[in-house]
């Protein structure tokens, strides 16, 4: 009898940890207080078991079949749409996924060092035509994914997507001449993952992400102002889920992320002031992220998840190039940032159709910005900041539909921004400028 009760309790806890069927970045953001971690990542998108994790662990596709969702938090111009379809009637069928979203490489070129330098500024500053330099248009991403089980305990998955954009513009030079300008970028994003189900409640998952691309800025004579000289990103992620009691799991994780973006400002006879040779600008960012959560799901409290966590990020940033036409390319910045944090997520089912969500986090950021330019510009800046963030949200389930809402906590004081004109902005982690103080995601399972 005791063994039977223990088995039933373990199964109930496993089901509770699986979370709701909805799988969106909106839900994750409402539980994570996204922000304050230097743009590196959202830790709850790894530690909270949700189909939003497919972006990191594509092997999760086998657990979230026959569903569709749209989410407006995935991009600055529009969100994402994901369709996952089971390819057979087997209990654990292969799953095909089609998706489109705004690129995670937005912007492609103008990524910054910790001190705020970009490849463009490191390659000689903005172009003379119009004084605008690189506009760096938003990318649009379209892709396909496949997930399957290999035996009883191994999950496999992969996604492949192509992205790109083109932007044409016209303007007037400082001398009054008209010009035409074209910017375009393309890139490939590949994700692969493998997961091991040790038993019904314990698991290990590993994910790999590789991104590479190109960028060009041309005029109407097909002459290049800026061209890419290397756009590359690599991330490795590992995560475990281990039962430590009948009501809780420990969820440790490690993520190593490297990002390099480089462009060359070409030598041009029709642009004054850039010198007689091309100038290259490169920004390299490296993140090492280590942390753990404790996921608590009491079996006698259906729909309740409490997930405190701690961790730290080490962020290293290097900017190489020249911001003056007559200076050879050298290291301009070599900086680092250490960000320990702690926080929690809480989700509870108030009614059969309504979930309440809350997240909070405190980040202590210890930053060293080292400008390595030759004297007298050489200097170092050291400072520490403490960032407190709070997030709130709701989950609504009606007739097979799931609606997730991520709400700026100031909304409860200021009201609906689009109605009363209050200054409440978009919630943390959401696309800015919505004017509602709310972002949303809608999904359906069949």
Image (cartoon, helix red, strand yellow):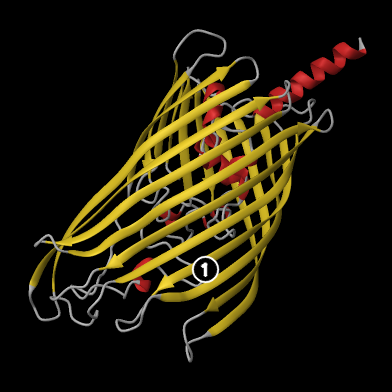
Residue 213 at x, y = what percent?
A: 34, 49
When the figure is inspected, residue 254 is found, relative to residue 315, above or below; the finding is above
Q: Which residue is outermost to the bottom?
A: 376
In the image, what residue occupies the spot 56% across and 18% down? 149
Residue 125 at x, y = what percent?
A: 31, 75
When the figure is inspected, residue 347 is found, relative to residue 365, above or below; the finding is above
Residue 437 at x, y = what percent?
A: 48, 52
Residue 308 at x, y = what percent?
A: 74, 46
Q: Going by the image, does 186 lie left or right of 206? A: left
**Crowdedness near tag 1: few (<14), some (14–19) or many (≥20) residues, C-alpha within 10 Å:** many
Front in this rendered view, residue 376 or 13: 376
Mark 1, residue position = 114
When the figure is inspected, residue 19 is found, relative to residue 66, above or below; the finding is below
In the image, what residue occupies the spot 70% across and 26% down? 16
Task: For residue 237, say whether it is visible.
Answer: yes
In the image, what residue occupies the spot 15% across and 80% down? 174
Front in this rendered view, residue 372 or 353: 372
Number of dots carrying numbers: 1
Front in this rendered view, residue 137 or 24: 137
Q: Going by the image, does 193 lie left or right of 82? A: right
Q: Quadrant of residue 299?
A: top right
Front in this rendered view, residue 354 or 13: 13
Q: Quadrant of residue 142?
A: top left
Task: For residue 74, say whether it is visible.
Answer: no
Q: Quadrant of the N terminus?
A: top right
């Amino acid at each position: 009898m005791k063994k039977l009760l223990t088995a039933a309790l373990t199964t109930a806890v496993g089901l509770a940890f699986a979370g709701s069927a909805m799988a969106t970045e909106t839900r994750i953001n409402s539980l994570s207080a996204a922000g304050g971690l230097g743009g590196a990542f959202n830790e709850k998108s790894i530690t909270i078991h949700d189909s939003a994790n497919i972006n990191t662990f594509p092997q999760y596709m086998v657990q979230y079949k026959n569903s569709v969702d749209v989410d407006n938090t995935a991009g600055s111009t529009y969100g994402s749409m994901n369709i996952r379809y089971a390819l057979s009637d087997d209990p654990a069928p292969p799953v095909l996924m089609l998706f489109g979203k705004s690129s995670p490489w937005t912007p492609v070129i103008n990524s910054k060092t910790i001190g705020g330098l970009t490849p463009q500024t490191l390659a000689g500053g903005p172009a003379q035509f119009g004084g605008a330099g690189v506009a760096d248009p938003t990318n649009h991403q379209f892709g396909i994914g496949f997930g399957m089980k290999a035996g009883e305990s191994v999950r496999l998955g992969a996604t492949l997507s192509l992205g790109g954009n083109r932007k044409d513009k016209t303007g007037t030079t400082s001398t009054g001449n008209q010009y035409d300008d074209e910017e375009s970028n393309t890139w490939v994003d590949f994700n692969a993952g493998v997961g091991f189900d040790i038993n019904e409640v314990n698991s290990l998952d590993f994910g790999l992400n590789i991104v590479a691309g190109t960028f060009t800025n041309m005029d109407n004579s097909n002459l290049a102002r800026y061209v890419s000289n290397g756009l590359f990103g690599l991330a490795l992620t590992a995560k475990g889920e281990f039962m430590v009691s009948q009501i809780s799991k420990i969820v440790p994780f490690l993520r190593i992320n490297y990002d390099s973006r480089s462009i060359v400002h070409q030598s041009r006879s029709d642009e004054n002031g850039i010198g007689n040779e091309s100038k290259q600008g490169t920004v390299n960012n490296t993140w090492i992220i280590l942390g753990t959560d404790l996921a608590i799901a009491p079996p006698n409290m259906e729909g309740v998840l409490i997930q405190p966590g701690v961790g730290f990020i080490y962020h290293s940033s290097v900017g190489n190039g020249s911001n003056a036409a007559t200076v050879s390319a050298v290291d301009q910045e070599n900086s680092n940032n250490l960000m320990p944090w702690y926080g929690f997520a809480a989700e509870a089912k108030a009614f059969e159709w309504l979930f309440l969500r809350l997240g909070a986090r405190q980040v202590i950021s210890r930053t060293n910005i080292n400008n390595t330019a030759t004297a007298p510009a050489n200097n170092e800046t050291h400072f520490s900041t403490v960032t407190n963030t709070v997030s709130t949200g709701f989950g609504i389930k009606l007739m097979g539909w799931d609606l997730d809402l991520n709400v700026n906590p100031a909304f409860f004081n200021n009201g609906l921004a689009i109605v009363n004109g209050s200054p409440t902005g978009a919630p943390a982690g959401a696309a800015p400028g919505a004017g509602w103080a709310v972002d949303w995601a809608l999904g359906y399972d069949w």
